[in-house]
């Protein structure tokens, strides 16, 4: 089944859309969730949440790329779940490690809490991504969007782990400058 | 530490997310698959019956892959119609059988690794090695994969995006004992069934990029003209066509609109029993003028008395 055929099923409110979407992208979405949650059961529930969110959002949404659209829904579901488990003091701690890495670049708690203009922040953040070299951008997003480990990134991109770490460090410095410009630091 | 940074990073555009996922296939470190002596011998034997690096007919049939459809040399020798393959130094793609009834086509493919890069593709974690398949009715277009991508929404060109999760649908795709991976490609052409198509496999991760694909240089010309017997059934002006691979329903002039949805495709067999085809179907779609179901197994059409589609019985002409 093609993405366009699947989208037609969503738009015609045919419940087979969810089952077909799971067949096409369920494994991929589960991988996205597993990278964040490191728990098979939690990842399965996130995929179910993401598919439900897709059912509720298409239409009106008409994703250009269904795979990436579902990946975003899955990531959102996984982060929400992580926030709940964090409150219950569960979890593997690897996201805390990521946040620690980002702490130099991260905005202040108060400033980030005041964020209400998502559109302008989206533009600013994507301008920041556009300013990066392709490899730098891929490494950054693999680490902080897909939450891959350093060794996974090095293996996938055929580069050394030290190069991954150095690239991430430089990218975080650039991100810090962006947040300073945006008054979030 | 405020975890809203996760939300900010979540605002990344989809184009960057797709870019991030592409692997550097030329520099990736490969894991070596342990081939048994039997598998190595099979690969050598297949190399001997294929010709060169381009398209070639050969006599080797991946019996396991077509057996998934219920096709064996004993039961349906006429459906094993010879195979065609294409390869580069990394992979070989073989069309094990091409079944067409003039409305729809069902093709069983097998994919084999020929070197470390091919094996790396077939062993990607959490993925089945099912390529995206472009097809064109124009030979000119198969040499320009970018044109195929750009024009994939035109009538002539479509992209089939195969199921990657086959764990619950093992009838559709599987690893075979000889190390190959087989999968099926079904497509409904309707009244515009071409006589031949040009098929180009593609790594979905290379789509939309300028990166080299592990499938570069591979293409197949397949004869998809009608080769299967079709039995005609009717209800008033509406016609139903049954073949060994599926059902096509067409609204005739003055006929009632077909019911939308896929609420039922059943066969009434000659012994009076009823068989629900939705228990084992590949793909089905309903519309007011056309509806079809592609079966995942071979239908014994000589044993069918009538067909019920969405509660309406269609009787033999």
Image (cartoon, rainbow, N blue to C red):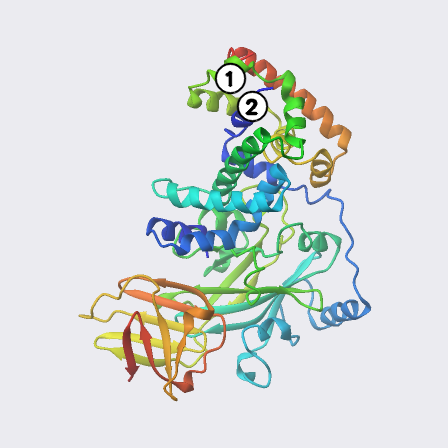
The residue where tag 1 is placed is A112
The residue where tag 2 is placed is B5
Vertically, is B240 above or below B14?
below
For the residue pair B258 and B139, the one nearer the viewer reads as B258
When asked about the image quadrant of residue B215, the answer is bottom right
Classify residue B207 as left or right of residue B115.
left
Q: Is residue B182 visible?
A: no
Q: Position of residue A94 (x, y in %)?
A: 67, 32
For the residue pair A100 and B141, the one nearer the viewer reads as A100
For the residue pair B27 and B290, the one nearer the viewer reads as B290
> Circles 2 and 1: CB distance less than 8 Å?
yes
Residue at 42%, 86% in the rendered image: B302
Q: Is residue B141 visible?
A: yes
User: Going by the picture, which residue comes out furthest to the front?
Assistant: A88
Classify residue B298 as left or right of residue A133.
left
Classify residue B233 as left or right of residue B194.
left
Vertically, is A14 above or below B193?
above
Chain name for mark 1: A
Q: Position of residue B157 (x, y in %)?
A: 44, 55
């Amino acid at each position: 089944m093609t993405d366009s055929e699947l989208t037609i099923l969503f738009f015609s409110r045919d419940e087979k859309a969810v089952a077909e979407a799971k067949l096409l992208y369920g494994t991929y979405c589960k991988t996205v969730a597993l990278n964040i949650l490191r728990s098979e059961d939690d990842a399965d529930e996130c995929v179910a949440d993401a598919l439900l969110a897709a059912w509720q959002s298409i239409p009106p949404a008409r994703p250009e790329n269904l795979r990436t659209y579902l990946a975003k829904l899955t990531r959102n579901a996984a982060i929400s779940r992580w926030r709940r488990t964090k409150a219950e003091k569960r979890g593997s701690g690897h996201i805390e490690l990521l946040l620690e890495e980002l702490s130099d670049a991260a905005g202040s708690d108060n400033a980030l809490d005041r964020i209400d203009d998502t559109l302008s922040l989206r533009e600013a953040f994507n301008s920041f991504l556009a300013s990066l070299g392709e490899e730098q951008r891929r490494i950054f997003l693999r680490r902080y969007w897909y939450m891959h480990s350093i060794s996974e990134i090095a293996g996938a991109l055929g580069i050394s782990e030290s190069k991954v770490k150095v690239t991430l460090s430089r990218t975080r410095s650039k991100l810090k400058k962006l947040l300073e410009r945006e008054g979030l630091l | 530490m405020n975890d809203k940074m996760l939300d900010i990073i979540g605002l990344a555009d989809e184009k960057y997310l797709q870019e991030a996922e592409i692997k550097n296939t030329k520099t990736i470190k490969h894991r070596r698959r342990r081939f048994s002596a039997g598998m190595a011998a099979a690969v050598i034997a297949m190399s001997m019956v294929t010709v060169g690096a381009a398209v070639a007919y050969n006599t080797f049939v991946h019996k396991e892959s077509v057996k998934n459809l219920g096709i064996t040399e004993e039961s349906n020798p006429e459906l094993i119609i010879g195979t065609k393959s294409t390869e580069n130094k990394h992979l070989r793609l073989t069309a094990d059988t091409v079944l067409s009834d003039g409305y729809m086509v069902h093709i069983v493919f097998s994919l084999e690794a020929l070197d470390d890069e091919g094996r790396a593709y077939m062993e990607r974690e959490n993925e089945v090695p099912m390529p995206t398949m472009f097809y064109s009715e124009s030979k000119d277009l198969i040499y320009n994969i970018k044109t195929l991508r750009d024009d994939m929404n035109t009538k002539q060109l479509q992209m089939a995006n195969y199921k990657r999760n086959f764990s619950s649908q093992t009838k559709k795709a599987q690893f075979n004992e000889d190390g190959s991976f087989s999968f099926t490609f079904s497509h409904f052409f309707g009244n515009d069934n071409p006589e031949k198509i040009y098929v180009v496999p593609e790594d979905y991760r290379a789509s939309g990029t300028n990166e080299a694909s592990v499938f570069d240089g591979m293409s197949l010309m397949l004869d998809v003209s009608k080769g299967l017997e079709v039995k005609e059934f009717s209800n008033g002006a509406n016609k139903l066509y049954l073949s060994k691979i599926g059902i096509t329903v067409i609204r005739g002039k003055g006929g009632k609109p077909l019911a939308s949805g896929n609420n039922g495709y059943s066969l009434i067999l000659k012994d009076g029993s009823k068989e629900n085809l939705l228990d084992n179907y590949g793909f089905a779609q309903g519309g007011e003028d056309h509806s079809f179901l592609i079966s995942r197994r071979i239908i014994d059409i000589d044993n069918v008395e009538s067909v019920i589609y969405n509660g309406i019985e269609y009787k033999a002409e």
